[in-house]
Amino acid sequence: MNESPRVAGNIIRRMEMRFVNPILKSPYALILPALAICVCFSVIPALMAFRNSFFSVDYVAGVDRFAGMANYRSIFTDGAFIQVFRNTVVFTFFSAAFGIPLAVLTAVFLNSNSPLCNFTQGVVFTPHVISFVSVSTLWTFMMDPQFGILNYALGLLGIRPLMWLLGENTSLPSIIIVSVWKTLGYNVLIVVSALQTIPREVYESAMLDRSGPVRTFFHITLPMISPFFVFLITTCVAQTLNTFDLVRLMTGGGPKNSSNLMVYWIYETGYLHFQVGKAMAGAVIFLFFVGAVSLLNFALTSRRAYYQ
Amino acid sequence: MPGPHRIKNYGRHGRGDYRPAINSEKRIDAAESMISLKGLKKTYPNGFTAIDNLNLDIQDGSFTVLVGPSGCGKTTFLRMIAGCEECTEGEIFIRGRNITKKAPGDRGVAMVFQNYALYPHMTVEKNISFGLKNYGYGREEIRAILRDVLELVGLLDYAKSKPSSLSGGQRQRVALARAISKSPEVFLMDEPLSNLDARLRVQMRGELIRIHQKIGSTTIYITHDQVEAMTMGDCIAVMNEGAIMQCGSPDEVYNNPANIFTARFIGDPGMNIVAWRDGVSLGFRSSKALLQRPSQFAGLTLNAAVRTREHLGEVYRYTLATARGEEIEIRNDYLLETGRHLAIYIRGENLYAFGADSGRIPTAGLVDDAEI
Ligand SMILES: Nc1ncnc2c1ncn2[C@@H]1O[C@H](COP(=O)(O)OP(=O)(O)O)[C@@H](O)[C@H]1O
Ligand SMILES: [Mg+2]
């Protein structure tokens, strides 16, 4: 009676050694599931995009013929692509340049355990769990030039009202503000957990070393959380480079492409204007750009960061 | 401003030319005490009182070991002196100056933490010079101090290493060098050796004593290690539940404990305590228990049964249970069978008596012929 489970166990073990172990010894077998997904949803589409960028494609008219470099030529002669590309770079840069320092400041405050902490934590983290649709609707209301609360607040300060999303000069900064606000909670979460890896005794040593709060922040806190910046900057840049929802929901890229970003442009060109070849040419260029930025990003940040 | 924190000139002394060890002459002429704690109390924000009405005077240049069970408030106490924890009540004086409200950096104290608390992103050299810069030392001075302290702890070759590439013992020595570099009047060490393996601990113990003798700063050293407490300090303060139970030389706390707690806590094994009568308890050291009644015996006869036996090599360690179920420990090289009933004898001069409040009372004439 006692024997049968053991016998069964032995058989299973023997089968395992015979059939499962050899498979597990091969690294490719282990990454196969992930690889399959990656090939289906990333590699094949990327290759197809690459192919289509050299073709003139029109699914409606059934056209699909080789066009050489024509698509690439057309996007570089088209002023819109250059502008959208520039917008994307500006958007990404400022989202990170404002978003990350703001996250660090907020996190340092949250980590100080003052009575306002729970409140702040709630306020800062809520946007992260709200959907982009709600966020966009909310901010569109607040940024309304006539009835919005932001212009009202500016009025109280004696500043002339802004056009916000409807102005050619203000639309891009407006969506930068929303993007920073939306991602702040997540970034703060990362920085807070980074801060919590610093032992209390290190701060006490700094106090005994007569290091004031500012000097401690720059010489102890920042360097010690620097490894987390690699992760933070990488995810932040990757996220903002790929922003689509904000543009789609708030401005539609307008006015006059002033707030249009790369991913929305690809969507617009390919699916609204049915210029698939041109959209794919843009996508290929963007893909190389994102790859280059990621490499650069990683190279720069990992050199500066210390690892324990 | 650098104030009184001038580096002592270690270089002037040769290796063998130590400052004299803390001796009795020095005690007499230094009438004022170095650190004086008056009515110290610490209540944490959660309402827990870790230290309550603590009074203690620590002599200039002494090496005071603070021992006590885990959680009794040793770390809290040390952090209060360092200024890392506010005092709820009471005052702290260093050399007569009231420093209760002073910032940690302005107290003339340095601390060595159990987990080293080095700055992991800085080299050994930077770890030490970071504080020196804040203290206002010039570049040349810093270089000289660095050389001195790194030589003192034997890490001259590691000046450019990061802490992550050092061993535990080396890291602790960096922490030590960092503390020494500021020539503190008071050195605080919170279980500095407890993260090291046994052999390294013995070695570092010796080095700490050597360094203390060389620089002569008043030191408060926390440990829960009996051996460290008995061998390192010239003064032992025994702490329990946030209060100092006794403070004295190692010899005194061992041979002349003021209360049951100290008697039980100091020594390995601690003192055996058995209840006697009228709330009075009697205590004796394991080594003083005799298995045969000597002629002309005056003292305590204790009837007990052998419960467990352990072979320690040279001797056996027995736990015995008295008729009331109290457990006592004796060491002897006789082989006794477990379960055996026997009487043990303790001479009157080896007995300690404690009153109902667990404080020590005189034994004279009390226990000429006691039997339990
Ligand atoms: N920040 C704190 N808040 C509340 N209680 C604390 C805090 N720090 C320590 N304690 C409590 O104070 C007591 C003494 O702690 P500690 O000084 O670290 O003891 P020891 O160093 O002797 O082991 C413990 O019971 C501990 O739980
Ligand atoms: Mg402790």
Image: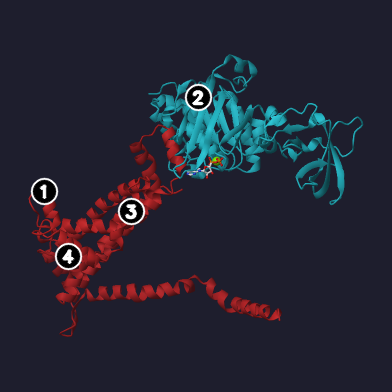
Chain colours: A red, B cyan
Nearer-N-terminus badge (4/3): 3
Above or below, comparing residue A90 to residue B187 in the picture:
below
Between A73 and B244, the one lying in front of the other is: B244
Residue B47 x %, y % = 47, 43
**Marker count (numbered):** 4
Nearer-N-terminus badge (3/1): 3
Task: Give the numbered dot on residue A156.
Answer: 1
Q: Quadrant of the N terminus of chain B?
A: top left
Above or below, comparing residue A178 to residue A200 in the picture:
below
Disc 4: host chain: A
Q: Quadrant of the C terminus of chain B?
A: top right
Mark 2 vs mark 3, foreground winner is 3
Q: Answer whether labels 2 and 3 touch (C-beta < 8 Å).
A: no
Which SS class for mark 1?
A: helix
Whether discs 1 and 4 lie on one chain: the answer is: yes
Mark 4 vs mark 3, foreground winner is 3
Above or below, comparing residue B112 to residue A277 in the picture:
above
* Residue type highlighted by circle 1: Leu
Disc 2: host chain: B
The residue pinned by badge 4 equals: A250
Residue sitting at x 53%, y 32%: B53
Determine the CA span between mark 3 and mark 1: 28 Å
- Residue at the right extreme? B295
Which SS class for mark 3?
A: helix
Which SS class for mark 2?
A: loop
The residue pinned by badge 3 equals: A121
* Residue type highlighted by circle 3: Gln
